[in-house]
Image (tube, grey):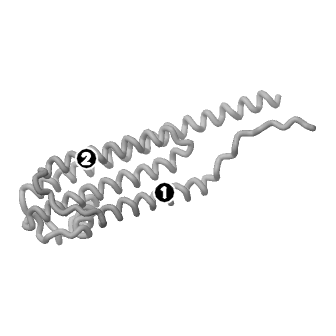
Amino acid sequence: MPFRRHSPPRPASAAGQALRALIRSLVTIVVVGASYFRLPFDRIDDLPAAFLLVGGLISVSAVCTWQVRSVLRSRYPVQQAAEGIVATATVYFAGFSTLYVLLSQADPLGFTEPLSRMGALYFTLTVFATVGFGDIVALTDGTRAVVSVQMIANLILIAVGIRTIVFAARRRRRQVGSSTDDREDVADDEDG
């Protein structure tokens, strides 16, 4: 019986990996979105908005850090980076939207209209996109302060968070590429 050399398992196709990344990203959006629209949160009560804001920003930072670490360990860093950006942005938008709903409930005069969950998500996205249609506006110093923090956090998320994930993907891609080249060199040496 001829000797057969076991080859390493073939990696999944790039299209297959991209499809898996897309599906996982959609699942993340659906789960976070369903949680945002379904979980019962009614009032800030005794919790200061600053505490919620800092807690939310820490949560987004933790998700982003976790995603960077996942990219650095991934066999498919570009797809993992795309998932990481989606997950980080989804948690970021849900966090600010939740805060705006709670602020609106605590002070109905804080915005030009009381914010529903959909209204708060819409407001969060218009602030992020710097569209500012003017249909919903922060009116009190407290709500303006939170919106100002979101504007600064938007810049940080784009300048630091997303760029860090992309940088990690590039770095890991070079590592995976060089280790693939090393395996091919070893295989050539064994054949020769």
Q: Quadrant of the C terminus?
A: top right
Badge 1 amino acid: Arg
According to the picture, the residue beneath numbered tag 1 turns out to be: 24
State the residue in front, 52 or 149.
52
Q: How many marks?
A: 2
What residue is at 20 percent from the left and 45 percent from the top? 54
Task: In the rendered view, tell whether residue 115 sits above or below residue 77.
Answer: below
Badge 2 amino acid: Leu
Mark number for residue 94? none
Task: In the rendered view, tell whether residue 160 sits above or below residue 190.
Answer: below
Task: In the rendered view, tell whether residue 70 sits above or below residue 29.
Answer: above
Q: Does residue 131 appear in the picture of this structure?
A: no
Real-space Cα distance between discs 1 and 2?
23 Å
Q: Does residue 9 appear in the picture of this structure?
A: yes
Residue 116 location in percent, x, y?
Answer: 21, 70
- Residue 64 horizontal side relative to residue 1, left or right: left
According to the picture, the residue beneath numbered tag 2 turns out to be: 57
What residue is at 23 percent from the left and 59 percent from the top? 98
Task: In the rendered view, tell whether residue 10 sits above or below residue 106.
Answer: above
- The image quarter containing residue 9 is top right
Q: Earlier in the sequence, mark 1 or mark 2?
A: 1
Contact? badges 1 and 2 (CB < 8 Å): no
